Image: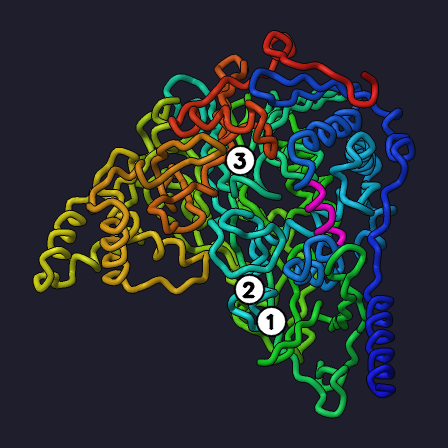
């Protein structure tokens, strides 16, 4: 009995000791009056129109940024907080072990090292004012909504805003995937930004997210046939989550007057249009990250070989609190290593260093601010020449009739003669590049002969339907420029000829085209299926005849698109999911089985399967992966339905007539109330979106006031 008592005491002491070690309360937020104190320095007027879209007015740009934060928090506060926690590298404390890889990457990339070293000295005063005003708007909202504010997360800061750009911008060219692949876990190959299909944003997940793609078009007045300059903005993003578009209109007496899309945590328009200029973004994937294989000293694991000598890593230990329950958290300690190349990853198959575009950069928000302020092509190019954004294509148009394409990137100034897309020897310092090529070297095409520019995530060597496309021979191989085409870019080439006028209706017809291009992956998969001999199975032989009659069109009323689309879908999406697609013949069998199981036939209308679902709204929608009418499902569901989760989202058609007068038509896939299912704006735009219709953008104050449903001044009403 005495032994049992002693064992019980030892166990109790162990439990107490474990509890003490795991005890890590998050802490509380400051009092409401303290959080709201800075709000008195700002005065923003928010007018919500009949669609719930916020039009934000202020004397200063900082006042407007303050209002942007408050308005966006009203509609998507939870996601904004998630972005802030992820950016700080402490999301796992709130969300558990699934978020720990993101916290580790924040530490590995030195996001806050950059903030600590450069925020005070290198962020321009007006940029800092905007960032800090945005933080003040969030803090005001937090003071009024303590029950929905995460414990210990407030106060929000200007540093949080700037750090968010440092953290997220490299993900758009795929740095997250490069890093996690080096860890050798193929099941966790990218950072989740789309929270559909059971995924959680910023958690490391199996590949399988919808593509981060886009379409963008610009038509000059000479090509339009009616003297109108047109810009069509059509980014393909997840429909919900931290990189889903939120529409806002920003107006200040200092000159801002811009409409467009923002992400949670961003104080200014990321792509959109002001009264004079506009731009559309598409994701590009040049080679902007280099992986070096390091040779480790067998006598000292903290040394690597460089130029014939053993060189010591820079090391630090970081603690990543992983939330367990209540005030308890597991404190995971990790040693970070850096070589002269950059961050180091130690994997079972080797030790690597990575050097990447955007490392140590802090000027991203400033470049967006200058773009928001641009008034003509010269201003736009001046803003782009800041070269603070590591990637992303730009298609530009303005009221003067100028159009332009920029295959933007921080292109490393690399040594010629090496294949930089492969792993590089880590023992040569001459392969450790310093800095980037100048903006003069960045591929760009301005006012092309045909008067038409486009990009659909394809090579910069196909940006116009005229004779003056960029040529690969004019750019060094070491820049690592894209050489791919997409079905969307091939289809644009099919639909244009360099001469025929592209007016409003023609441009919209191109954008909403639902057919796959000849020579596309879809076309190739179908050809492979039809090359098989199906004569030994009557059911499959009949299905093959049905597939042969498919015209590659993904219209909602097509009775061939279901079989065709399901047959080709996994092959098309494999390029960005990383999932091995089945051979075409097996994909065809799977499609036949799926349709027979759920519909008892192989020819239901595509719109019966392909759905836009939001709350109680459930609508047929046409298009598919890599069609110009881009609709990506979260998954092939086990109920016979595909629910749209990415692709076409916020769309804008901007027009300037011959006198420079502007009109614009816009649409959002759901509505302005991102999270509030009880709001009419949770899904009020979905029917228009599914029907490929738009609504007029309200640009003049008089029109905004005539359509106002609520007017208020945060912190002052």
2 vs 1, front mark: 2
The residue under label 2 is 188
Disc 1 residue crowd, few under 14, some 14–19, many 20+, Cα 10 Å: some
Disc 3 residue crowd, few under 14, some 14–19, many 20+, Cα 10 Å: many
Q: In this picture, is 69 found above or below 155?
A: above
Marks 2 and 3 sit apart, C-alpha to C-alpha, by: 31 Å
Q: For the point 70% across and 27% down, which residue is it?
A: 71
Is 327 included in the stretch rendered in magenta?
no
Looking at the image, residue 376 sits to the left or right of residue 476; the answer is right
Residue 386 visible in the shown view: yes
Is 17 in front, or is 157?
A: 17
Residue 310, picture quadrant: bottom right
1 vs 3, front mark: 1
Among the two numbered marks 2 and 1 on one chain, the one whose residue lies closer to the N terminus: 1
Among the two numbered marks 1 and 3 on one chain, the one whose residue lies closer to the N terminus: 1
Return the x and y of residue 177 as percentages of the image width and height. 56, 61
**Magenta span of residues:** 80-89
Q: In this picture, is 341 found above or below 323?
A: below
- Badges 2 and 1: C-beta atoms under 8 Å apart? yes
* Dominant SS in magenta: helix
The residue under label 1 is 183
Query: Secondary structure under badge 1?
Result: loop
Query: Secondary structure under badge 2?
Result: loop
Disc 2 residue crowd, few under 14, some 14–19, many 20+, Cα 10 Å: some
Return the x and y of residue 349 as percentages of the image width and height. 58, 80
């Amino acid at each position: 009995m005495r032994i049992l008592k002693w064992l019980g005491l030892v166990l109790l002491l162990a439990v107490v000791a474990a509890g003490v070690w795991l005890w890590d309360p998050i802490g509380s937020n400051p009092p409401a009056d303290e959080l709201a104190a800075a709000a008195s320095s700002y005065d923003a007027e928010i007018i919500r129109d009949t669609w719930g879209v916020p039009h934000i007015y202020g004397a200063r740009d900082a006042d407007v940024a303050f209002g942007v934060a408050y308005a966006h928090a009203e509609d998507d506060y939870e996601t904004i907080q998630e972005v802030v926690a992820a950016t700080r590298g402490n999301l796992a404390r709130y969300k558990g072990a699934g978020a720990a890889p993101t916290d580790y990457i924040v530490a590995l990339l030195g996001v806050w090292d950059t903030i600590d070293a450069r925020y005070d000295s290198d962020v321009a005063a007006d940029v800092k004012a905007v960032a800090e005003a945005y933080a003040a708007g969030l803090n005001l909202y937090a003071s009024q909504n303590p029950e929905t504010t995460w414990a210990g997360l407030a106060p929000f800061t200007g540093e949080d805003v700037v750090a968010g750009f440092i953290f997220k911008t490299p993900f758009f060219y795929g740095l997250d995937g490069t890093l996690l692949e080096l860890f050798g876990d193929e099941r966790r190959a990218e950072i989740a930004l789309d929270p559909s299909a059971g995924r959680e944003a910023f958690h490391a997940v199996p590949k399988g997210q919808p593509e981060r793609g886009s379409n963008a078009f610009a038509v000059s007045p000479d090509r339009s046939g009616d003297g109108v300059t047109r810009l069509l903005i059509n980014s393909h993003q997840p429909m919900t989550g931290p990189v889903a578009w939120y529409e806002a209109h920003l107006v200040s007496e200092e000159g801002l007057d811009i409409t467009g899309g923002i992400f949670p945590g961003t104080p200014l328009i990321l792509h959109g249009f002001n009264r004079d200029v506009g731009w559309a973004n598409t994701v590009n994937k040049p080679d902007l990250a280099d992986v070096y294989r390091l040779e480790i000293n067998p006598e000292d694991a903290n040394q690597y070989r460089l130029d014939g000598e053993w060189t010591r890593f820079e090391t630090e230990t970081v603690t990543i609190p992983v939330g367990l329950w209540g005030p308890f958290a597991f404190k995971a300690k990790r040693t970070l290593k850096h070589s002269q190349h950059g961050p180091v990853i130690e994997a079972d198959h080797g030790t690597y260093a990575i050097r990447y575009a955007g490392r140590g950069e802090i000027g991203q928000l400033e470049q967006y601010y200058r773009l928001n302020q641009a008034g003509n092509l010269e201003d736009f190019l001046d803003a782009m020449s800041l070269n603070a954004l590591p990637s992303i294509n730009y298609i530009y148009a303005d009221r003067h009739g100028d159009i332009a394409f920029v295959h933007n990137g921080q292109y490393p100034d690399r040594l010629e003669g090496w294949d930089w897309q492969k792993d590089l020897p880590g023992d040569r310092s001459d392969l450790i590049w310093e800095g980037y090529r100048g903006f003069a070297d960045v591929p760009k095409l301005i006012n092309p002969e045909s008067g038409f520019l486009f990009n659909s995530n394809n090579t910069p060597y196909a940006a116009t339907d005229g004779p003056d496309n960029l040529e690969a021979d004019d750019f060094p191989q070491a820049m690592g420029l894209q050489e791919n085409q997409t079905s969307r870019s091939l289809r644009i080439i099919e639909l244009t000829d360099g001469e025929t006028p592209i007016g409003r209706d023609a441009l919209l017809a191109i954008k909403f085209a639902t057919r796959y291009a000849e020579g596309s992956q879809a076309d190739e998969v179908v050809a492979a299926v039809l090359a098989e001999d199906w004569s030994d199975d009557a059911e499959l032989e009949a299905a093959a005849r049905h597939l042969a009659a498919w015209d590659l069109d993904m219209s909602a009323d097509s009775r061939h698109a279901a079989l065709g689309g399901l047959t080709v879908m996994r092959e098309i999406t494999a390029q960005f999911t990383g999932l091995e697609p089945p051979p075409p013949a097996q994909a065809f069998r799977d499609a036949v089985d799926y349709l027979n199981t759920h519909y008892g036939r192989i020819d239901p209308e595509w719109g019966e399967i392909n759905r836009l679902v939001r709350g109680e709204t459930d609508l047929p929608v046409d298009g598919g992966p890599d069609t110009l009418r881009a609709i990506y499902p979260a998954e092939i569901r086990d109920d016979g339905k595909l629910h749209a989760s990415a692709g076409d989202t916020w769309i804008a058609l901007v027009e300037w007539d011959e006198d420079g007068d502007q009109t614009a038509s816009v649409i959002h896939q759901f509505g302005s109330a991102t999270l509030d299912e009880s709001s009419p704006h949770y899904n009020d735009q979905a029917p228009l979106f599914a029907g490929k219709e738009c609504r007029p953008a309200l640009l003049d104050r008089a029109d905004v006031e005539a359509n106002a449903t609520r007017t208020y001044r945060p912190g002052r009403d």
